[in-house]
Image: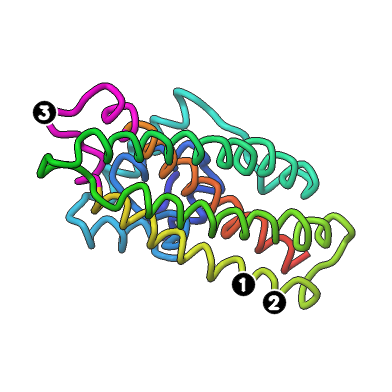
């Protein structure tokens, strides 16, 4: 039974497919994972019981791996392989597409001016962030560091996650919620589709760290 008094982070951890529901309704389950389902839904005019029913149905149709019960090294490998490595590749492609769209459609009022620059800044921030995780924090966790030993680097990573979340919000503002205008070419439409995919994957990535990996490392 899904309890609306559980936090979004708890639900995303216990019912992994709930993230699909949260993304559909634009409920922040990563950096905003401390809110209860009831609080988050009522804040945007959603029925908590209806959303809970969606979560239950989603879990029955396509079950997912629960990472709160797997060994930490497995979780670290999963994060690097499924999120870190693809993120680096995807950003390169998206920046190239954004530059092309801004160059070709510069005179149109609907052109997302500043999008490529914002993506380049996000890429630089994420590259530094991923490097710190892969070179410092993740090896420390693999070596058995826990509690106060990893408290400070985890605090820094969570603050940077908040910054990434703000950058994602700015992406939505620059792209009118990833909705291409009627005159958009194929590259423009593919760019917005790719950006929406980037948002969903980065949110799931941050959730796994904020709500699963970091609490386990701190409380081991």
- Give the mark count: 3
Residue 15 percent coordinates (x, y): 51, 42
**In the image, is 144 to the left or to the right of 99?**
right
- Label 3 CA crowd tier, 10 Å (few <14, some 14–19, many 20+): few
Camera-nearest residue between 110 and 62: 110
Question: What secondary structure is the magenta-colored segment mainly?
Answer: loop
Which label number is shown at residue 156?
1
Q: Which residue is mark 3?
A: 182
Q: Is residue 45 above or below residue 88?
A: below
Are the residues tagged 1 and 2 within 8 Å (C-beta)?
A: yes
User: SS class of the residue under badge 1?
Assistant: helix
Q: Nearer the viewer, residue 115 or 217?
A: 115
Residue 188 sits inside the magenta stretch: yes
Location of mark 2 (residue): 152
Q: Residue at x 33, y 38 (%)?
A: 53
Q: Secondary structure at mark 2?
A: helix
- Is disc 1 surrounded by few (<14), some (14 to 19) or many (20+) residues within 10 Å? few
Q: Secondary structure at mark 3?
A: loop
Quadrant holding the N terminus: top left
Residue occupying image coordinates x 30% and y 48%: 26
- Viewed as shown, does residue 207 lie left or right of 218? left
Give the Cα separation between the discs numbered 1 and 2.
Answer: 6 Å
Instruction: Please state if 45 lies on the left or on the right of 195 as rendered.
Output: left
Q: Where is residue 122? Give x, y as percent.
A: 46, 55
What colour scheme was applied to this rendering of the protein? rainbow
What is the distance, in whole Å, between disc 2 and disc 3 at their CAs?
A: 48 Å
Q: Is residue 199 above or below residue 118?
A: above
Magenta stretch in the rendered image: 175-192
Q: Earlier in the sequence, mark 2 or mark 3?
A: 2
| Residue 132 on the magenta segment | no
Q: Along the polypeptide, which appears first: circle 1 or circle 3?
A: 1
């Amino acid at each position: 039974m899904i309890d609306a008094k559980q936090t979004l982070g708890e639900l995303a951890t216990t019912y992994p497919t709930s993230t699909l529901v949260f993304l559909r309704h634009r409920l922040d389950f990563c950096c905003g994972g401390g809110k209860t389902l009831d609080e988050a839904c009522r804040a945007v005019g959603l029925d908590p019981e209806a959303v809970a029913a969606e979560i239950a149905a989603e879990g029955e149709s396509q079950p997912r791996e629960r990472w709160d019960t797997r060994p930490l090294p497995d979780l670290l490998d999963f994060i690097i392989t499924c999120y870190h490595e693809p993120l680096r590749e995807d950003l390169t492609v998206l920046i190239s597409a954004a530059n092309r769209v801004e160059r070709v459609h510069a005179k149109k009022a609907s052109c997302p001016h500043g999008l490529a620059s914002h993506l380049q800044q996000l890429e630089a921030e994420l590259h530094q962030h991923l490097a710190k995780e892969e070179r410092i924090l993740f090896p420390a966790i693999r070596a058995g560091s826990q509690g106060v030993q990893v408290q400070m680097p985890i605090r820094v990573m969570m603050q940077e996650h908040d910054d990434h979340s703000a950058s994602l919000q700015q992406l939505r503002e620059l792209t009118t919620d990833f909705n291409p205008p009627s005159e958009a070419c194929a590259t423009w439409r593919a760019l917005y589709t790719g950006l929406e995919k980037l948002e969903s994957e980065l949110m799931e990535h941050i959730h796994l760290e904020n709500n699963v990996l970091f609490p386990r490392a701190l409380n081991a």
